[in-house]
Image (cartoon, helix red, strand yellow):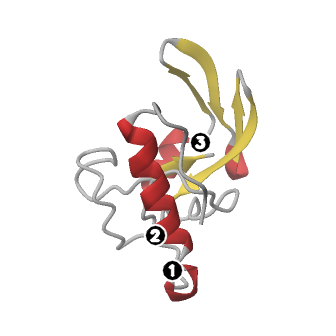
Amino acid sequence: HMQPPPSGASDGTAWLLEAWNEASGNISTWPESLAMGTVGWRRVKGQGIDGSPLASRVSGTEWSWAGIPGLAFRPGGELKTPWGSGVWGAAPKGVDFHDKGFCASAGEGCLFAD
């Protein structure tokens, strides 16, 4: 368990500490899964790109993030950003992401970028 935050720390700090201690105290019960409990957790470069209509439309395109250009989805899962290199791919099908609209609609799936 982590030590408590110093007095005067924000309420969010106490909540994060409790969440961390609860999660880390139960690591042995975590299931082996590729389910994305938190969209954005590390995935494998290019995972799911083959056979994904959504990924085929995004591959080779360049986007902006918060108005900053240069987010490039290169073929094979290579991601180039103004902040450095990363990976991208398509999330596994059939996973309930509880994303409240974050992923594409009409069953097209969800892409990740790390």
Query: What residue lies at 68% left-to-right and 50% top-to-bottom?
Result: 77
Distance from Cα at disc 3 to Cα at disc 2 = 39 Å
Which residue is denoted by mark 3 in the rendering? 59
Comparing labels 3 and 2, the label whose residue is closer to the camera: 2
Disc 3: CA contacts within 10 A as few (<14), some (14-19) or many (>=20)? some
Q: Where 63 falls versus 100 (above or below)?
A: above
Q: Quadrant of the N terminus?
A: bottom right
Secondary structure under tag 3 reads: loop
Q: Position of residue 46 (x, y in %)?
A: 66, 57
Distance from Cα at disc 3 to Cα at disc 1 = 38 Å
Furthest-top residue in view?
67
User: Which residue type carries mark 3?
Assistant: Ser
Pick the residue in front: 98 or 94. 98
Earlier sequence position, callout 3 versus callout 2: 2
Query: What residue lies at 54% left-to-right and 44% top-to-bottom?
Result: 5
Query: What residue lies at 40% left-to-right and 70% top-to-bottom?
Result: 93
Disc 1: CA contacts within 10 A as few (<14), some (14-19) or many (>=20)? few
User: Which residue type carries mark 1?
Assistant: Asn
Pick the residue in front: 6 or 108. 6
Pick the residue in front: 29 or 11. 11
Disc 2: CA contacts within 10 A as few (<14), some (14-19) or many (>=20)? few
Which residue is denoted by mark 1 in the rendering? 26
Residue 22 circle label = 2
Distance from Cα at disc 2 to Cα at disc 1 = 7 Å
Q: Position of residue 66 (x, y in %)?
A: 48, 17
Earlier sequence position, callout 3 versus callout 1: 1
Q: Where 15 falls versus 1 (above or below)?
A: above
Secondary structure under tag 2 reads: helix
Q: Where 48 falls versus 88 (above or below)?
A: below
Please say if the residues under marks 2 and 1 sit with CB atoms less than 8 Å apart: yes
Q: Position of residue 114 (x, y in %)?
A: 63, 46
